Each structure stands twice: as C-alpha cells, then as structure tokens.
Image (tube, rainbow, N blue to C red):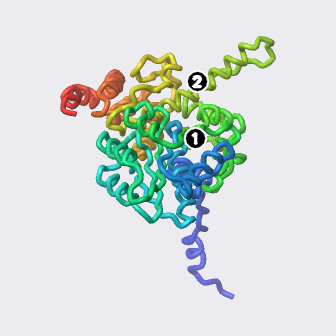
C-alpha cells in the first residue's frame, strides 16, 4: 500500500497542544480559595451571632420593643456590633407584628433632620410601633435637639411607643446624649467578645466565605489576632482583611504569625513562663492589652471623623504614652516589600470607594509608617479638611519622604482650614 506523499507534512504541521497551567491568583480570594471577602464587606443579617455574653442584652432589647414603652439606650465601644444587634432585635419585633421604624446613618454620612423628623412623626400615636435610632452621638446638633425634645414630650395620643437608641461609650460625654441617657428608662451595655467568642466570630465569617480557620490560619496567628482585636468585631474585620492582603502579597499559603506581623506591625517578644517572677506574666498581659486597646481606640477616633462635633475625650488615650492629638508613628518601622505596600494602598483606596474611611486609614498608615510617601499623602487626604492638624502632620511626613504633591496640599491647607 502506497503512503500518501503529504502525510509527513500534515503530521509535522500539527504539533500536540501544550497543556495550559493554572492562572496565577489575582487576589487573596483566589490564593486562599474563598468565594467572597469574609471580613472586607459590610456585615448583613446572616452574619449576626447571638453570643452568650450578649444574650441578656439582646433579650432586654427585644422585650422592650415588643412589650415596653419609653426610651432605652444601647451603649458600647465603637465597632462592638451595636447596629447589628439593634437590627436583629428590630427583626424580632417585626416578626411579632409590630411596625419597626428605623433611622439609620448611611455609611460615611449622617441622618438628616428631615429623615429623623419623619420617623418621629410616624412613631407618634396608635397603633403600637417601635423606633430604632442608631448612632445618636453622631447626629448633628439640630437632630439631637429634635430627638431630645421628642423624648421629653412623652406619650402622645394615649400611646407611648418604645424607642431604642444606640451610641458609643465616648459619645455619652456629649451634652445632648448624656441628657438622653438621663431620660432613658434603661441603659443596656454591649461588651466586647471574649476570646472564645472572637474565635467563633472569625470561624463563622470564614465558613460563610468557604474557608476554615484550621485550613487558613495557624493557631499562633489566630491567638495573636484575637488578642490584638480586644474582642471588638469591627477591629477583627480590619485586622483580618489587612492580614489576608499581606498573605497574598507575601505569597503565604496560610496565615502565620509572620503574616500578622507584616500586616499589623511587629510582634512583641514573648516572656518566658519558666521564670518564677510574677511581673513577667503581668508585663506580657499588659503588652497584649495595650496593643488591643490602641487598635480599638484608633477605630473610635477614626469613625468620629464623620461627627460634626468630635468627642470631647477619648479615654483610651489616657492609657497610652502618646501625646494628645499626635499621630502614632513608629520609631523604627519594620521593612516592608514594595509589593506589600502597593497591596495595602490598593486596598485602602478600595475601602475609601466603599465609604469605609476607618479601614482605609488603617491600611494607609501601615504603609506610611514603613516609609511609603504616597500612603502618607493618601492618609493626610482622609483628614483634610475635617482635621487640619492631622492632615498637616501626615502631609509633612509625606514631604519628608519625597512626595511633591503633599507639599502643594500642605501649602493650601491653612486656607482650607479657615474656610471650613
């Protein structure tokens, strides 16, 4: 049998297709096999967990909305989950057939006087309704005065519909808020999570996104993150988001203590537990508490940037050695790779686009303290023009690091502060 003359040419012209390798991960979701960001997106009702330490507070809120009357005030540190608790208690009242009227603060904004007045008007008179007003310490003076006046007026049309207000611990020092606290029938406090509850919070958030702590986080890294968060859910979110981004920039297959150090700062050396002297144990505990309190205090200050009047005092600063109104700048910043700096700045810009200024500032500050001029400029812009002093401090830092844009922003800052 004669072979066709073009057989060899056809075989040579058709090489075997090369096997395509897997595409490199584009972000930490790809690297760690997560379906969505576990900690970077705002929480929703599906994430709410009724922890044991908060069960009594939740039961009191739900009972007041269903059976009570008058005003109750929910108080807690910034980021402890007051909004989620308030919303979930309102859902219980709605399931009981009670109309729930909510005046919530949009992200990065404040409740307008028209919205608050409309809500208060709907609350007056029968049938029974329940009202929720979140973040009363961030209301404008006009709105706060309107709310105080409505509470003082008391029952109208033979109906005293229940209202639950929420505010931060530091917000209680504001005159109008302290007056509301005096008019409230009960002040319910929402505390931070204990370590086991914080572990459960992280595990649940990862599980919803398709991951587990056992697969993604080493035990020592998890303990460090929980200790630094001080049990504040919002702080946990910011620390975890920064750590996952650092893990992606470093290419870590799992989050370790080194990943945490790269994301949120160096780890204090452990003291030996074999030494008989008790002060070693106390010193270690004080270091962990101080770090957690510093993070929590920073979140309190950052979110207060949306308030027309900043809180008159932040108790956490009395517990630190930093001078009042000074930006905490590390004396010896830890070396950071350019890739990690770029990832932090990128995530900071994305957080700004979502309206989460607090998360953006945390990411920018970490890169700025490592010597990144662009991050220092971006951090200054988050304070400009609301806080000219803070903005000037970070613009000056950026100028010293070589950013020419910051020099122009710093020169125009006095004019801005006068006009603001």
Residue 238 visible somewhere in the drawing: no
Distance between the Cα atoms at labels 2 and 1? Answer: 21 Å
Q: Which of the two marks, 2 or 1, is nearer to us in this view?
A: 1
| Quadrant location of the C terminus in the rendered image | top left
Mark 1 closeness class: few <14, some 14–19, many ≥20 residues within 10 Å: many
Q: Foreground: 62 or 247?
A: 62
Q: Locate residue 359 relative to residue 23 in the image: left or right.
A: left
Image marks 2 and 1: residues in contact by CB distance under 8 Å: no
Mark 2 closeness class: few <14, some 14–19, many ≥20 residues within 10 Å: some
From this viewpoint, which residue is outermost toward the bottom? 1
Closer to the chain start, of discs 2 and 1, is: 1
Residue at 56% across, 79% down = 6
Where is residue 63 shown, x and y percent of the image?
Answer: 59, 54
Residue at 48% across, 42% down = 184
Q: Foreground: 34 or 134?
A: 134
| Quadrant location of the N terminus in the rendered image | bottom right
From this viewpoint, which residue is outermost toward the front? 158
Q: Locate residue 45 relative to residue 154 in the image: left or right.
A: right
Residue at 65% across, 46% down = 56
Where is residue 58 shown, x and y percent of the image?
Answer: 60, 49
Where is residue 7 shown, x and y percent of the image?
Answer: 60, 79
Work out whether 352 lies above or below 20: above
Residue 139 visible somewhere in the drawing: yes
Report the residue marked by disc 1: 190
Q: Locate residue 374 relative to residue 238 in the image: left or right.
A: left
Report the residue marked by disc 2: 290
**For numbered disc 1, what is the local secondary structure?**
strand
Q: Foreground: 67 or 30?
A: 67
């Amino acid at each position: 049998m004669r072979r066709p003359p073009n057989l060899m040419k056809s075989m040579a012209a058709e090489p075997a297709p090369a096997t395509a390798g897997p595409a490199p991960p584009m972000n930490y979701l790809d690297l760690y096999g997560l379906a969505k960001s576990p900690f970077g997106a705002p929480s929703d009702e599906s994430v709410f967990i009724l922890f044991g330490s908060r069960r009594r507070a939740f039961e009191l809120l739900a009972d007041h909305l269903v059976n009570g009357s008058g005003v109750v005030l929910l108080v807690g540190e910034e980021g402890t989950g007051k909004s989620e608790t308030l919303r979930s208690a309102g859902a219980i009242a709605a399931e009981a057939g009670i109309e729930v009227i909510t005046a919530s603060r949009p992200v990065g904004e404040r409740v307008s006087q028209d919205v608050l007045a409309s809500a208060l008007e709907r609350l007056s008179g029968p049938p029974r309704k329940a009202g929720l007003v979140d973040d009363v310490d961030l209301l404008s003076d006009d709105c706060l005065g309107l709310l105080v006046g409505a509470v003082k007026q008391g029952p109208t049309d033979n109906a005293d519909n229940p209202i639950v207000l929420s505010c931060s611990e530091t917000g209680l020092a504001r005159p109008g808020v302290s007056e509301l606290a005096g008019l409230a029938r009960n002040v319910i406090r929402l505390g931070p999570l204990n370590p086991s509850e914080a572990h459960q919070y992280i595990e649940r958030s990862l599980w919803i996104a398709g991951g587990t702590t056992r697969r993604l986080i080493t035990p020592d890294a998890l303990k460090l993150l929980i200790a630094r968060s001080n049990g504040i859910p919002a702080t946990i979110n910011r620390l975890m988001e920064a750590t996952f981004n650092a893990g992606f920039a470093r290419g870590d297959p799992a989050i370790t203590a080194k990943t945490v150090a790269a994301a949120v700062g160096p780890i204090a050396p452990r003291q030996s537990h074999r030494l008989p002297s008790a002060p070693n144990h106390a010193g270690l505990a004080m270091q962990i508490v101080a770090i957690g309190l510093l993070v929590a205090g920073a979140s309190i200050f950052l979110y207060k940037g949306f308030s027309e009047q900043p809180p008159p005092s932040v108790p956490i600063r009395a517990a630190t050695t930093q001078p009042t109104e000074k930006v905490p700048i590390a004396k010896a910043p830890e070396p950071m790779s350019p890739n990690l700096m770029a990832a932090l700045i990128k995530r900071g810009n994305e957080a700004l686009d979502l309206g989460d200024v607090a998360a953006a500032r945390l990411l920018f500050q970490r890169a700025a303290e490592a010597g990144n001029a662009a991050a220092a400029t971006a951090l200054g812009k988050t304070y400009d023009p609301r806080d000219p002093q803070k903005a000037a401090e970070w613009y000056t830092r950026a100028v010293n690091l070589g950013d020419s844009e910051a020099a122009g922003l710093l020169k125009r800052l006095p004019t801005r502060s006068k006009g603001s």
